[in-house]
């Protein structure tokens, strides 16, 4: 019996072979490299990857799909059955470096990307299929409509690149939105500022993004005795480059020490 996509898991299975080939070519996996696939589903991308490498690991939440993957790939696939938002990612990745790939369900993409920041030191690179709107936010430049909290947070720790778009008809069932493939490379000179410091700062700054900073984040920083001279009072959060946010976050960390 064919597997019926489950809405609660946000399942849209990649079916277009040309798109699959294009993703694998972008990843360019080599035998001997360690790969972790998130959400292998029915194994379309898994099969293509296993044509290039002898083994890979995967995390799958759907137990019916997990059983089928085990039958199909045997010991070529190390499968972790569970919710990737609850799985111990450090344990799943091991010592690294690991190349992480996946066609991610839209409903978990942002929280998962944020979770992965904490284990970026174990990751060689990440290639994900995401909702196009999310990828646009990830790669957005300052002073553009898509530039916001998620993009600043991820660009602080990764070099990001949108590779190509994928139409709904490449999936079964087709989603109602376009998708894109994004490449994320952990920065070789990773910021000393922890995400736990940067994220709350961005939440305050972008929480009312149309307001000037003097009415949002500047009072918040002043209450914490943080030097915010790098932030122009009449600017808005979306106008401030990533590096400046990192500088302010570093001062916030010092003030909190």
Image (cartoon, rainbow, N blue to C red):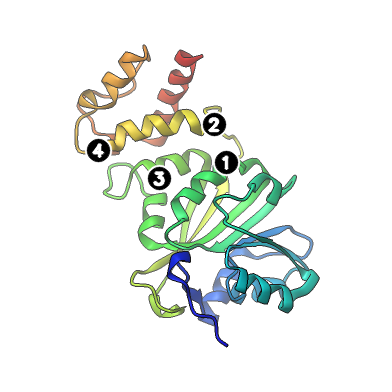
Q: Residues within 10 Å of mark 1 (few under 14, many from 20)?
A: some
Mark-to-mark CA distance, 2 and 1: 8 Å
Mark-to-mark CA distance, 2 and 4: 24 Å
Q: Can you say which quadrant of the picture contains the N terminus?
A: bottom right
Q: Which callout, 3 or 4, points at the residue further toward the start of the chain? A: 3
Dots 3, 4 in contact, CB < 8 A: no
The answer to whether one can see residue 8 in this image is: yes
Residue at the far top in the pictured view: 225
Residue tagged 3: 151
Residue tagged 4: 209
Dots 2, 1 in contact, CB < 8 A: yes
As helix, strand or loop, the secondary structure at mark 3 comes to: helix
Mark-to-mark CA distance, 3 and 2: 15 Å
Dots 4, 1 in contact, CB < 8 A: no
Residue 191's tag is 2
As helix, strand or loop, the secondary structure at mark 1 comes to: loop
Residue at x 40%, y 62% (from the top left corner): 131
Residue 72's tag is none
Mark-to-mark CA distance, 3 and 4: 14 Å
Residue tagged 1: 187
As helix, strand or loop, the secondary structure at mark 2 comes to: loop
């Amino acid at each position: 019996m064919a597997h019926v996509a489950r809405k609660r898991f946000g399942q849209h299975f990649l079916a277009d072979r040309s798109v699959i080939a294009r993703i694998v070519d972008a990843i360019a996996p080599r035998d001997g490299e360690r790969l972790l696939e998130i959400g292998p589903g029915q194994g379309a991308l898994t099969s293509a990857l296993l044509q290039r490498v002898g083994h890979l690991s995967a995390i799958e939440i759907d137990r019916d799909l997990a059983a089928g993957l085990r039958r199909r790939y045997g010991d070529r696939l190390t499968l972790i059955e569970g919710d990737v938002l609850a799985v111990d990612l450090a344990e799943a990745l091991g010592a690294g470096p690991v190349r992480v790939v996946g066609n991610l369900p839209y409903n978990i993409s942002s929280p998962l990307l944020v979770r992965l920041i904490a284990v970026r030191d174990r990751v060689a690179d990440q290639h994900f299929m995401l909702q196009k709107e999310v990828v646009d936010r990830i790669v957005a430049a300052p002073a553009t409509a898509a530039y916001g909290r998620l993009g600043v947070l991820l660009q602080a720790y990764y070099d990001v690149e949108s590779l190509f778009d994928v139409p709904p008809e490449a999936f079964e069932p087709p989603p109602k939105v376009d998708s894109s493939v994004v490449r994320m490379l952990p920065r070789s000179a990773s910021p000393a500022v922890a995400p736990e410091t940067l994220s709350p700062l961005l939440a305050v700054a972008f929480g009312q993004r149309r307001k000037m900073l003097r009415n949002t984040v500047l009072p918040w920083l002043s209450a914490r005795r943080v030097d915010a001279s790098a932030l122009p009072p009449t600017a808005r959060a979306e106008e401030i480059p990533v590096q400046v946010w990192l500088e302010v976050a570093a001062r916030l960390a010092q003030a909190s020490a």
